[in-house]
Image (cartoon, rainbow, N blue to C red):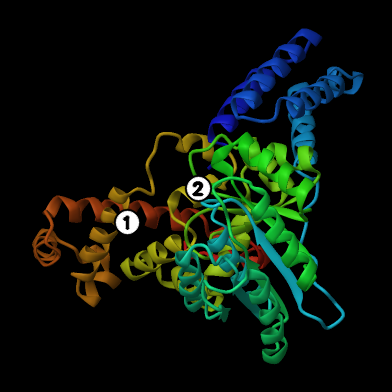
Amino acid sequence: MAFDSLSEKLQNVFKKLRGKGRLSESDVKEAVKEVKIALLEADVNFKVVKNFVNTIQEKAVGEDVMKSLTPGQMVIKIVNEELTDLMGSEKTDITFRTDGNPTHIMMAGLQGSGKTTTAAKLAGKFRDSGRRPLLVACDVYRPAAVEQLKVNGEKLGIPVFSMGTDVDPVEIAKAAVQHASENRNNVIIFDTAGRLHIDEEMMDEIIRIKDEVGVDETVLVVDAMTGQDAVNVAKTFDEKVGIDGVVLTKMDGDTRGGAALSVKAVTGRPILYVGMGEKLSDLEEFYPDRMASRILGMGDVLTLIEKAQEEIDEEEARKMTEKIRKEGFDFNDYLSSMKQLRKLGGITKFMGMLPGVGSKLKGLELDNEETEITLNRNEAIIFSMTPKERENPEILNPSRKKRIAGGAGVDISEVNRLVKQFEQARKTMKQMPGLMKGKGAKRGLFGKMPF
């Protein structure tokens, strides 16, 4: 995730604080100094950092903290609260019209920010919540952008309105409004043109579209990997056009994350969503408190639960949980678990949201091409087993393993390795019966997941 480096540094600072029974004022000042350096290295705006650390130091040297039985934890609590406040305190939603007229949403941003893909991702989110979105191709300067929008719309089953590349974008927007009225679309998403850099022509075009069709929400898409440049772009767009919120893309990449910690404080505009991958489903609503928890290594179980609820079939999960409880865990369940884990975004995303785990993943390439090859190989091995062998793993003797290896085209050592992994997973199942029983199973993470 974008904050891996920052998270590791902050956790090291807090580890030192927790190791002290009592904190002196100099202990706090030294910790705050390290926090300041970590934030600056993460490319957080220097004015934002200055105000942030001053607030922390003022609160951390207070009498309540210094006399606390757990002063280290109190300091962490203060940092967590201030990080949350820095990113906006509360989740901000796009405001939809309630007067029966369609909500007009305009997407803006520089070329390469992921604007067109984000427009489609948003449309998918709105469709899933029961709305009827229409995507509008207003980027007439890049034929590839029009085609990309059409392709993504088709994948999602969402209509795309376009008039080619020889028509004024304002006329396209006006025609799209009429089209939406005739086809009962209640959300219109205008994908406007991006440029390699901010220019007056670009701004004028966006303003003309806003004036002509009456845009309700202007959403700016910025690339988180550009750091403070992303914040500067957001500030310029807000000053010249006026924006209502920001979507940060590529937050799953190797970026320092400073944009997410700076954009609200610098522009006053909230972060609405963050892009966490290339799939059309990889768009997360932005919760400041959950992001602060991730940064501080406290995990983000709530988002993980919501992701599981979206991606995993509840009836399938219930049946599997019941089967595991009564009959045990077999290779058919193992196959299904791998399938569901892929739906959740892979091992790294899953583990990174668990409290205290994210920092331990540093340096481990869990979702790379080699891992995908391993998963495919494991599936081939299981598919080479007979139905009886999948249901009764204990009958896998050396001769059966040799036959399975030949059928999967792998060395027998790979079969032995998979069987050993399976046995470890099976033991884990036996050690967590409490997590798959009672009310928690229906609401919690393990009630939704097949392991």
Q: Is residue 364 above or below residue 155?
A: above
Q: Is residue 436 visible?
A: no
Q: CA distance from mark 1 to mark 2?
A: 19 Å
Residue name at image x 41 percent, y 64 percent:
337
Q: What's the amino acid at mark 2?
A: Met
Percent x, y of residue 163: 55, 79
Q: Nearer the viewer, residue 204 or 108?
A: 204
- Residue behind mark 2: 351
Residue 208 drawn at (x, y percent) = 74, 64
**Residue occupying the point 18% across, 52% down:** 414
Q: As drawn, which residue projects farthest toward the right?
A: 63
The image position of residue 412, as x and y in percent, is: 12, 54
| Label 2: element kind | helix
Q: In the rendered structure, which disc, 1 or 2, sits on the residue that comes first in sequence?
A: 2
Label disc, if present, on residue 422 of the rendered structure = 1
User: x and y percent of residue 381 in the render?
Assistant: 21, 63
